Image (spheres, grey):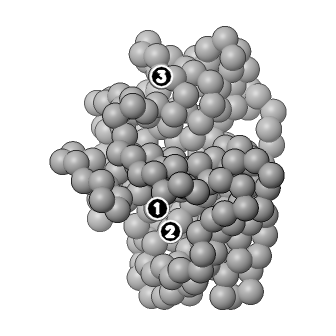
Amino acid sequence: MIEIRRFASLGRAEHGWLSARHHFAFGHYREAGRMGWGRIRVWNDDAIAPGTGFDPHPHREMEIVTYVREGAISHRDNLGNQGRTEAGDVQVMSAGTGITHAEYNLEPVTTTLFQIWITPDQRGQPPRWGSRAFPREAGAGFVALASGREAEAGGDALPLNADAAVLAAKLAAGGAATASVAAGRMAYLVVARGSVTLNGERLDERDAAAIAGAETLSLVAGGEGAELVLVETAPEG
């Protein structure tokens, strides 16, 4: 089963400094059938004005992945971690038993990003944060950015305390990629940039596809190329 979810259908919130679109229930946005997908609880598509951001606030028992589309985000937390994650790169914060963090756009331009929350497999784990740059070459297929799956353990992927993987692909114009979703698994695909056809169905920039069951995903980029983010998870725990 593949359900296409157009960008125009997402929930929205406008806060002046922050323009947000919600793939799933968040804040005041509630819609039946969009309360999550597998272990994914939140997928926010945020635009953060220059010189603004999220002041220090706490989290517990959640895996929070940030994928930067444009600009950069600067992180600081009460564990002493700090860093700058720029477009195309990813940061992972495992909130565990508790962490307080701030995320600011210190750039002269608007920063756009995906903020993805995934429920952890085990509660009571120590909090941690990490960030990593990833290759930007087109045509390499899907690359694991963060993962709790054994197959990616010890590789370049940032660790997740969840039965899930965050993958990304960059395709040149007309370039192709494939991915498989195993029986009993779920996946959520969002076009970060450009456009693709997914099994013959066109998805434009920031459109999404919710995928369940055994599916082979065949993707072909449009004339401007495409950048894709795919999260594959176990069903809801």
| Circle on res. 63 | 2
| Within-10-Å neighbours for mark 3: few <14, some 14–19, many 20+ | many
- SS for callout 1: strand
Amino acid at the residue labelled 3: Leu
- SS for callout 3: strand
Residue located beneath label 3 in the image: 203
Q: Residue lying furthest left in this view?
A: 32
> Mark 2 and mark 1 in contact (Cβ < 8 Å)?
yes
Q: Look at 39% across and 31% down and name the residue there.
A: 8
Q: Based on the displayed image, in which of its 4 quarters is residue 42 positioned?
A: bottom left
Q: Is residue 90 left or right of residue 215?
A: right
> Mark 2 and mark 3 in contact (Cβ < 8 Å)?
no
| Within-10-Å neighbours for mark 1: few <14, some 14–19, many 20+ | many
Q: Look at 48% across and 22% down and name the residue there.
A: 203
Residue located beneath label 1 in the image: 117
Separation of disc 1 and disc 3 at Cα? 23 Å
Q: In the picture, which quadrant includes the N terminus?
A: top left
Report whether residue 187 is seen.
no
Q: Look at 69% across and 31% down and name the residue there.
A: 170
**Residue 125 % position (x, y):** 50, 85
Q: Is residue 194 left or right of residue 72?
A: left
**Residue 132 % position (x, y):** 76, 59
| Circle on res. 185 | none
> Mark 3 and mark 1 in contact (Cβ < 8 Å)?
no
